[in-house]
Image (tube, rainbow, N blue to C red):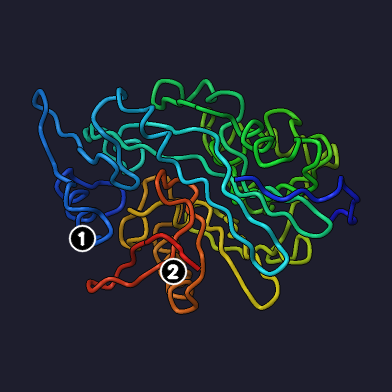
Amino acid sequence: MAPARSHPERRPLRGGPAKLSEASIYRAATSLPSLPACFKLIRLRGRCQYSAGRTPGLSFPGAENYGEAVGDLARESLRIGEVELRALEDGIFTTAAGNLLGDDSLRARIRGALQPVLAVTAEHIVLLDAGFGPEIPPGLKESYTLRRERSLPQSLREAGYEPEDVTHIVLSHLDPDHAGWALQERHFPNATVYLQRAALEEAAGMPAGHPRREVAASARHAAEEDWAVLLEGDVQIVPGVRVEVRPGHAAGHQIVWIESGGEAALFTGDLAPSNIFLNPDLISSADTDPEAARRNRAEILSEAERRRLPVFLYHEPTLAVARILRTEKGGFKGVPFEG
């Protein structure tokens, strides 16, 4: 861990997993009571699309409504004891459902937000995950589109801070949509990056051309240059911010607990990134250990529900901070957190 570093005076914050059919995705998604009644499966020009409107975590047909979607992004902040938290922005991505759910025949469009979290303590400014970076990596440009109203650095400035103010960056894992601004270049020149060694080792062993493998090379360089720290298990990053290893989406995937003054909040990374994935049985094809993902998601969401914790959902476009409720069918749903 890096020693405590002084920073500018605190400023208040402003403002079957791999083969799912279209029908099975629809059943899984609509089993979540959090999805509004307007959710429906329609067919346009002979292909299946999800028509969701403001439905959390799913896309509308086409990109023509994108501007409205960006306006709907939740810019939520809260205080946990002496720690100030705010969901930042790095845009919205759109991709085919098959890219996340393992069947290339699925042409439904799914959209997801990129919402790193800013945690401001008495002595440190900590960033939890770091968006896509200046642009989508070349290997993903054919399958993902990215639209931005503001980038992560711009969103940070709107919160009252400069990239130079950030002292620590915690990466849940090495997917490029979580590590981009932290590792593509040193966009936060005074920050130390923290990730699990297991996440780096798994990513480095991916096939050539895999997005995580390319990020792993940048992470290894950062570690060699002493501005990234490879962790080995659960650890406190700074007082009030600690990581807990919960693999499944990736080896060494870490969630982040924010704890201060007898209160707590949770950042789940890609363990439970959006409302649709609050169903533990809906597994992404990107999960490297589906059984661990299912088990860890169920355990963490059970704890969040029992303790009535605020949970930051990194990819949820309209619900950045959720309270977790249990459904009648044994799953979970997110509703707006109201304290």
What amino acid does circle 2 point to? Leu
Of marks 1 and 2, which one's residue comes earlier in the chain? 1
The residue that label 1 is drawn on is 31
Question: How far apart are labels 1 and 2 at the CA level?
Answer: 17 Å
Q: Secondary structure at mark 2?
A: helix
Q: Secondary structure at mark 1?
A: loop
Camera-nearest residue between 30 and 106: 30
x%, y% of residue 160?
71, 40
Dot 1: within a 10 Å radius of its alpha carbon, few (fewer than 14), some, or many (20 or more) residues? some
Q: Quadrant of the N terminus?
A: bottom right
The residue that label 2 is drawn on is 301
Q: Is residue 174 left or right of residue 111?
A: right
x%, y% of residue 107?
23, 31
Position of residue 186 relative to residue 86, above or below, is above
Dot 2: within a 10 Å radius of its alpha carbon, few (fewer than 14), some, or many (20 or more) residues? many
Quadrant in the rendering for residue 206: top right
Instruction: Identify the residue at image location x=22%, y=56%.
Output: 28
Instruction: Identify the residue at image location x=46%, y=65%.
Output: 338
x%, y% of residue 102?
31, 41
Position of residue 212 relative to residue 36, above or below, is above
Position of residue 77 relative to residue 223, above or below, is below
